[in-house]
């Protein structure tokens, strides 16, 4: 059944006074604050997780090394040469032995990164190599 109504907005009148508590009771259900309500598939994409948010969080939360064959690498966080003022942290992969390959992977949210055959995904990242 379709119903019609009228909405009247009185722009000259003041509304109810907002309490200082407005917004404090936000619940982060299913990672809604950082991944649940938008198409982000990468958890902790800027390496910003911190124990102040959750006791067991750290900058590499949701990131794991990828080691193939006899590869060996040390993965650390740096902020000395930040990409910009909004992305201060970045991962450094120090390759001790390349073996069959080394790298880093993201675990995504809850049950991994769901990809579906035939769907299109956009991926971007900044990378640089230090030859020293």
Image: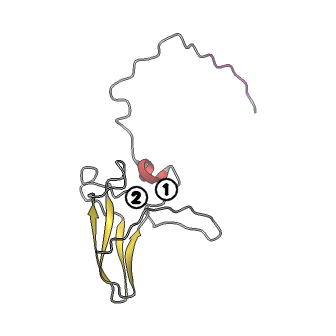
Eye-nearest disc, 2 or 1? 2
**Quadrant in the picture for residue 2:** top right
Sequence-wise, the earlier of marks 2 and 1 is 1
Q: Can you say whether 59 is above or below 101 in the image? A: above
- For numbered disc 2, what is the local secondary structure? loop
- What residue is rendered at 38% in x and 75% in y? 103
Task: Between residue 11 and residue 93, name the one nearer to us.
Answer: 93
- What residue is rendered at 68% in x and 19% in y? 6
The image's colouring method is secondary structure
- For numbered disc 1, what is the local secondary structure? loop
How packed mark 2 is, by other alpha carbons closer than 10 Å (few <14, some 14-19, many 20 or more), is many
User: Quick check: marks 2 and 1 in contact, CB under 8 Å?
Assistant: yes
Label at residue 40:
1
Label at residue 45:
2
Q: CA distance from mark 2 to mark 1?
A: 9 Å
- What residue is rendered at 28% in x and 50% in y? 53
The N terminus lies in quadrant: top right
Type of secondary structure dominating the magenta stretch: loop
The total number of labels drawn is 2
Label at residue 107:
none
- Give the farthest residue toward the front: 132
Q: Which residues are magenta?
A: 3-8
Task: Tell me if residue 92 is in the magenta stretch.
Answer: no
Q: Can you say whether 74 is above or below 51 in the image? A: below
How packed mark 1 is, by other alpha carbons closer than 10 Å (few <14, some 14-19, many 20 or more), is few
The percent position of residue 130, horizontal first and vertical second, equals 33, 71
């Amino acid at each position: 059944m379709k119903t019609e109504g009228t909405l009247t907005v009185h722009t000259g009148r003041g509304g109810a006074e907002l309490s200082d508590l407005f917004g404090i009771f936000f619940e982060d259900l299913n990672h809604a604050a950082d991944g649940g309500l938008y198409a982000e598939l990468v958890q902790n994409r800027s390496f910003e997780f911190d124990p102040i948010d959750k006791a067991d969080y750290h900058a590499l939360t949701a990131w794991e090394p990828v080691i193939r064959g006899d590869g060996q690498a040390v993965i650390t966080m740096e902020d000395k040469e930040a990409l910009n003022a909004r992305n201060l942290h970045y991962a450094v992969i120090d390759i001790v032995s390349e073996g069959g390959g080394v790298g880093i992977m993201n675990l995504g949210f809850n049950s991994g990164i769901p990809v579906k055959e035939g769907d299109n995904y956009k991926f971007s990242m900044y990378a640089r190599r230090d030859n020293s």
